[in-house]
Amino acid sequence: MSLKESLERFKKQQEKCQTTLSSIASTKAAAAPRPAPAAARAPPPAVKFSNDTERLQHINSIRKGPVGAQIKRVIDLLLETRQAFTPEQINEACYVDANANKAVFDSLRNNPKVYYDGRRFSYKSKHNVMDKNQLRSLIRKYPEGIAVIDLKDAYPNVMDDLQALKAAGDIWLLSNFDSQEDIAYPNDPRLPAMNVDDELKVLFRSIELPRDMIDIEKELQKNGMKPATDTAKRRALAQSQGIPNKAKPKKKKHEISKRTKLTNAHLPELFSRP
């Protein structure tokens, strides 16, 4: 066999092998499973932008409002909750930023209705009593009477306790004729009981009282007694604030005229003891 024939034969064998290999490769490719298409990614959640414009405007109006109005918001918060708040907690609760407003901070710190311990603010009532027993003890320290309006903010249910003390006979609650404000007087059972002559009772009840509460206060002062009220000061304050005096509703049966005599007959409980 010549060399040329040998080369031709080798070339044909190479082509045959190449064809076989290509056929095998194509068969494998067809049999192989196609990969599943990748799952489509979920789109990222849409960014939600705050649309609380009305609330932000409300906060801004509070912080730009008068100092007095901001102080009132804080005092109302302290009175209602009876808790101590830091300036940051006050800002969260009622949007008054005391740290950013020196005038508000100083006014709060010096307000007679607010107690500041150097870190937190809390409500400060005129009389530091917390329950009925302390309330009874306080009233007993004022034999000349104590105005109920000065007790109203002592603690949340103080008015209920006043009525309970009255029902138990521990105190008297009498109305101020001029201002219609109640005065609490002690009825201390520790005091010895005494008998009052009937003639003295009649004399007491027949005493004519001045019509104006200011005149009654003057008479008390003349006799060395301190009035529980200051009508002149109250009227001046009301007039400066444009508050009209509260008039007592008129009733035909009890209408007061120039001929009417005001006496102590409305205080029968003072002589109800045997």
Image (cartoon, rainbow, N blue to C red):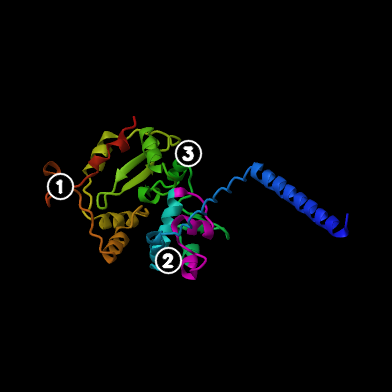
Direction from residue 180 to residue 48 in the image, left or right = right
For residue 91: magenta?
A: yes
Instruction: State the residue at coordinates (88%, 57%).
Output: 2
Figure check: 3 above or below 17: below
Instruction: Report crowding for label 2: few under 14, some 14 to 19, many 20 or more residues within 10 A (C-alpha).
Output: some
As rendered, which of 154 and 68 lies closer to the eye? 68
As rendered, which of 157 and 196 lies closer to the eye? 157
Q: Which residues are magenta?
A: 81-106
Q: Quadrant of the C terminus?
A: top left
Q: Nearer the viewer, mark 3 or mark 2?
A: 2
The residue that disc 2 covers is: 63
Figure check: 264 above or below 74: above
Label 3 is placed on what type of residue? Asn
Where in the figure is residue 46, as x and y percent of width and height? 48, 56
Mark 1: which secondary structure?
loop
Label 1 is placed on what type of residue? Lys
The residue that disc 1 covers is: 250
As rendered, which of 138 and 115 lies closer to the eye? 115
Q: Quadrant of residue 205?
A: top left
Instruction: State the residue at coordinates (49%, 67%).
Output: 106
Where in the figure is residue 169, as x and y percent of width and height? 37, 34
Instruction: Report crowding for label 3: few under 14, some 14 to 19, many 20 or more residues within 10 A (C-alpha).
Output: few
Mark 2: which secondary structure?
helix
Q: Nearer the viewer, mark 1 or mark 2?
A: 2
Label 2 is placed on what type of residue? Arg
Q: Quadrant of the N terminus?
A: bottom right
* Tag 3 near tag 1, CB within 8 Å: no
The residue that disc 3 covers is: 133
